[in-house]
Image: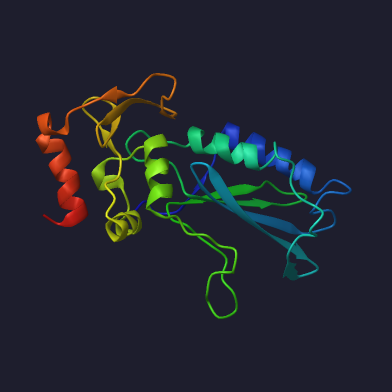
Amino acid sequence: MRASATVDDPFIRAGLVRLQQEVFAEGGLGYGADEVVSTSVARQGMAQRRVRILRDGAWGGRDFHLDFSHEAMDAWVLELRRHLYVVGAGTWVTYRFHVFPAADGRLEVFDEEIFPLDQNGKRVWNSSPAGAGDLHAELVAFPRTVDNIPAWMWEVFRAEGVMPPVYNPVLRTVDWKNRRLPVTEDGTDFSVDDMVIDPSKEPGFFSKIGRKLFGS
C-alpha cells in the first residue's frame, strides 16, 4: 500500500483557495473558525464525508444546515480522483482537506479507508466500509496492477470470493472476467464498447491474479 502523502500542484492549490473563500465567508460553515478539516472516503459511485471545525481551541462538528457547495467539495473530489490517478497504481481512497482563514490549505491523501472513530475506538455508526462489489467498480474505473492492489482490498475480495479487475500493462487495458477496456491517464475510457476476451488464451496473466487471490 502506498504511504499517505500531502499532495500539491496548481490544480489542487486553486481548489483549496475556492474552499477557503467559501468556507470562511460570512454564512459559511467555517465562518469565525480557526480551521476546518473535511475527510472524504471516496470510491466509484459514492463518497462519505466528515467535517470537523476548530473554534476557540475546541473541535466540533458543523451545523446541520451548513455545508460545502457541491461544486467546491463533492464535485471537486471526483475531479481529484481522476487528476491524481496514476496508471497501474490507482487513485487515492481518502482525501483530507485542511483549510484556514488566513493561511494556505493542504490536502492529505491515503490509500485506505479512514473513517472517524468514537471514544471507544470503533467506527461511527454511519461509516460504511467497501465491499467486494464496491472495490470491483473502483478497480474497473481506476485500475491497478496485481502488485498495486493493497492488502486490505485483497482481504475483501478473498472474503467474498471475487476476482478483482486488473490493469494489463502490456495492452494498457483493464481486464476482468471476459471483458477489457482501454485505460488513459485519467482512468478507464468508458466511451468505447468493452472488448470480449477469452481468458484461456492468456493464462499467464490471469493465473497471476488467481495465485494472489487464492494462494494457488
The image shows residue 123, relative to residue 212, as above or below, that is below
Residue drawn at (32%, 40%) of the image = 144
Residue 134 on image: x %, y %: 43, 48
Q: Position of residue 44 (x, y in %)?
A: 48, 42
Residue at the image position 81 percent from the left and 49 percent from the top: 24
In this rendering, position of residue 136 left or right of residue 211: right
Left or right, residue 81 beside residue 37:
left
Percent x, y for residue 132?
37, 52
Instruction: Estimate the x, y position of residue 174 in percent, counting from the top left.
Output: 31, 32
Left or right, 20 with reference to 41: right
Q: Residue at x 26, y 47 (%)?
A: 163
For residue 60, what is the image quadrant? Answer: bottom right
Q: As displayed, is residue 46 above or below residue 10?
A: below
Residue nearer the viewer, 3 or 61: 61
The quarter of the rendered structure image containing the C terminus is bottom left
Q: Quadrant of residue 177?
A: top left
The residue drawn where x is 43% and y is 55% is 112
Q: Residue furthest top?
A: 192
Q: In the image shown, does 94 or 97 lie closer to the viewer?
A: 94
As drawn, the residue found furthest toward the bottom would be: 120
132 in relation to 194, above or below: below
